[in-house]
Amino acid sequence: MRLTAAICASFLAIAPAMAQKSRPHHRIAKVIATPLSTHDCGHNVALHLSAPDPTQGSLLLLELRSATQPVTGIKATWDNREIPFWQEPKPDEKSPDIWRALLGVDLELKPQQYPLILTTKTESADELTCSASIDVKEGKFATERLTVAPNFVQPDPEQLARAEAERQRLRAIFATVTPDRLWDGSFRYPLTGITTGGNFGKRRVLNGQPGSPHGGVDFPAPTGTPVYAAQRGRVVLAEPLYFSGNTVVLDHGLGLYTLYAHFESISVQPGDLVDTGALLGKVGATGRVTGPHLHWGATVNRARANPLQLIALLGTTGQ
């Protein structure tokens, strides 16, 4: 039987235990990207975009800045999705009112122009509408040919049913938007001392058959290497999945999720609130793999994006 809904080794997981205490959001995230596109919304309110013409699979940082009075009730839509904003703490009363949001460009989104529409109100009750055109460019992704176990290319009916059920479950998880921002500050690489990963977006031919695009970044590492949470979040999945093996998914709030796959063992369980750097498990070679490595993925408002851009946009912590 041909696999009609192949799940890229990058989306699934949930298991053991390690709860972390919640802490207040007292740090201001270090923003690395310099706004490249600015739109005047009127009343001294401006909308900044970190990139006006992103490629497939990339992330944008949006910033709404009000110089003279607070703004409230921000609503933004892009590609038929709502984009949630969070407010940055003000160092002092004279500082501008700043709201930020992450916008994910899906790995397979059709290259074309998409309007971003934003509405808000000022303290004086003036309603403002701000719009921008985001021109999505085609990503330049390589193609590679791999040989894997036959059951991961042509599953039997029972295996195919399991994989499809897991795919639908993950879709439901990623479609859930926690209204609170759980992450606090900068992101870190999930492996200590390993800052280079690859294969994001690669088009794969598995045992001679076209597979789904690779929706995450692979970090080669020996079996047993500790894997750490890239940021504060709640464990929403930690278990073995058919294609991604032992997998952990963290909900960071506001529609942002990170996924860690192919573990040898898992050290957390669903419901745990973990801090940045918490041990999630150990590198392994479970699921559809050709050898031990960590697969790290990111989903932002249901869009599959390169997780390395979380670090590029929001900075990195020391490891």
Image (cartoon, grey):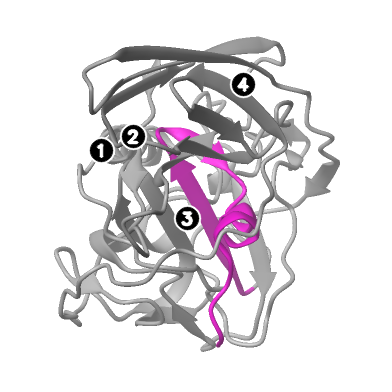
Quick check: 217 left or right of 164? right
Work out whether mark 1 precedes mark 4 in sequence or the reverse, and give the earlier one. Answer: 4
Say which residue appears at 52% left-offset and 74% top-offset. 190
* Marks 2 and 1 in Cβ contact (< 8 Å): yes
SS under mark 2 = loop
Going from N to C along the chain, the mark reached first, 4 or 2, is 2
Instruction: Identify the residue position indicated by label 3 in the image.
Output: 244
Q: Kindly report the distance in space between the C-alpha atoms of the residues bearing marks 3 and 2.
A: 29 Å
Residues under labels 4 and 2: Cα distance? 20 Å
Q: Circle 2 is placed at which residue position?
A: 84
Q: Which callout, 4 or 2, points to the residue nearer the camera?
A: 2
Q: Residues within 10 Å of mark 1 (few under 14, many from 20)?
A: many
Camera-side residue: 26 or 152?
A: 26
Q: Is residue 180 visible?
A: yes
* Displayed quadrant of residue 54: top right
Residue 309 placement (x, y as % from top left)? 63, 53
- Residue at image mark 1: 177
Q: Position of residue 28 (x, y in %)?
A: 41, 66
Magenta part of the chain: 292-319
Of residues 199 and 132, the one nearer the viewer is 132
Q: Which residue is mark 4?
A: 109
> In the rendered image of this protein, does residue 319 appear above or below residue 145?
below
